[in-house]
Amino acid sequence: ATAQIGVTGLAVMGSNLARNFARHGHTVAVHNRTTARTTALIDEHGHEGTFVPAETPEEFVAALQKPRRLIIMVKAGDPTDAVIDEFAPLLDEGDMIIDGGNAHFLDTRRREKKLRELGIHFVGTGISGGEEGALNGPSIMPGGSAESYKSLGPLLESIAAKAPDGTPCCTHIGPDAAGHFVKMVHNGIEYADMQLIAEAYNLLRTVAGYEPDRIAEIFRGWNTGRLDSYLIEITAEVLAHTDAATGKPFVDVVADEAEQKGTGRWTVQTALDLGVPVSGIAEAVFARSVSGHTDLRRAARSLPGPGAEPLSADAAEAFAAQVEEALYASKVVSYAQGWNMISAASAEYGWDIDLGSTAAIWRGGCIIRAAFLDRIRTAFAADPALPTLLADKEFADEVGRAQDAWRAVVATAVRHGVPTPGFSAALAYYDALRAERLPAALTQGQRDFFGAHTYRRTDREGSFHTVWAGDRHEEAAG
Ligand code: 6PG
């Protein structure tokens, strides 16, 4: 056995990951259910490093040095269980199965527990950066046992993206499903970022009256400032692209129905279960869903709108600057919500996740990579128990400075009838958190009225109920 690591499942992600290991000097065993893919990988890329092609699971396992490190890169869901069932009987105690797919973290918990009983380490690992990242350096989020990371960490770190300060974008996130959980939240934040960018584009297009190539220029400008990020960068590329067939802006010939594979939806479903408000991510998921409901959109097309005219050239320029502020402030809110979710799950499942390191490994390689993440890392380094990013002095000051523009943008959007669910929800969250009193007191009164659900008081300990149907005196409740 000569291979330090093995990859089974050689679709693009799997084969790019295998090539990345080989290019870093590791001997990589490669296997695929249909051998044609294995052969194709060796034919096309065999010269990039040392590969050990295996036709059968037995050959594959035999090619791996002990303790074996076997990465599975198959479609998340049943195929993952099938591959685990196929390989687990061939492994020995102390071997590691690394699942690099976008698995649901509850599946990872179940699999980890089952394999732990057999003495096998199951390492649910988030891998972000798409096909390009898998080949040239992804951000890697391994869960599983600390012991497995000792053996696996150096290998993963060698192929991971490097942050601007040179550190690898890979760290042990925490036990069992912590890695897949954090990857799920990464994707939720990715949805929120994309939605906020889409809203900014829509406002610049319809309210400021700018054409896509002009908006691409604006995004390029933003990309040199605090919004500097991969998603802003590619947005400019997409907006500047012209459709070859029609000569029109590419963005005008693409059907306006956003699809999703489901990780954003999982984030929101899980947040609901954990009781963590992630309104920015939720609005992003719902916005994709609304766009896809062509039946509803067709039925509602003739509903009246405000009919506001686009802004004058001067006003448009000022407005574009305000949109940058609204985008930035809303982004801070959705990251704050995402980190609240990681922190809540860490407490719930006993994962002990280092919140700052999570930001650190997203500085490079992943889809949401951005200069901004270094600031989040710093915020948690200064206060590991920071209750919300909005309480960090620097973020609080910046968002505070942006708030006038943020409000102006949301108000203008409303006046022009342009939907900005992301900007609006983020602003509502900001205002809710800073409010002295919330109308939740009234909600409690209503609940007590119709269902004797009781309430707590501001001036005394305990639970109370008012006898609404009778003389409305107050009773101490259970
Ligand atoms: C990544 C991406 C990746 C995937 C998205 C696409 O981190 O590399 O997040 O995992 O491309 O999840 O998601 P949707 O199809 O749901 O938009």
Image: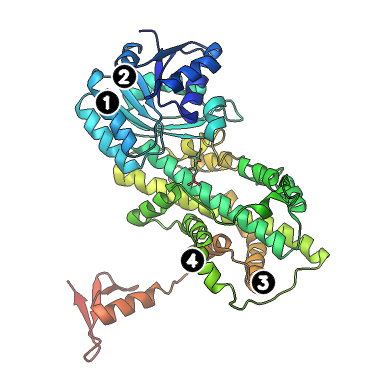
Circle 4 sits in a helix, a strand or a loop, which is it?
Answer: helix
Residue position marked by numbered label 3 in the rendering: 416
Is there CB contact under 8 Å for labels 1 and 4? no
- Give the crowd class for mark 1: few <14, some 14-19, many >=20 residues within 10 Å: few
**Quarter in which the N terminus is drawn:** top left
Earlier sequence position, callout 1 versus callout 4: 1
Is there CB contact under 8 Å for labels 1 and 2? yes
Q: CA distance from mark 3 to mark 2?
A: 61 Å
Q: Which residue: 60% across, 43% down?
A: 372
Confirm if mark 4 falls within 8 A of ligand 1.
no
Circle 1 sits in a helix, a strand or a loop, which is it?
Answer: helix
Amino acid on which disc 1 is placed: Glu
Is there CB contact under 8 Å for labels 3 and 2? no
Residue position marked by numbered label 2 in the rendering: 57
Q: CA distance from mark 2 to mark 4?
A: 55 Å
Residue 456 at x, y percent in the picture: 29, 72
Earlier sequence position, callout 2 versus callout 4: 2
In the image, is 346 to the left or to the right of 463?
Answer: right
Amino acid on which disc 4 is placed: Ala
Confirm if mark 1 falls within 8 A of ligand 1.
no
Earlier sequence position, callout 3 versus callout 2: 2
Residue position marked by numbered label 1 in the rendering: 86
Q: CA distance from mark 1 to mark 4?
A: 51 Å
Q: Mark 2 or 4, which is nearer the eye? A: 2
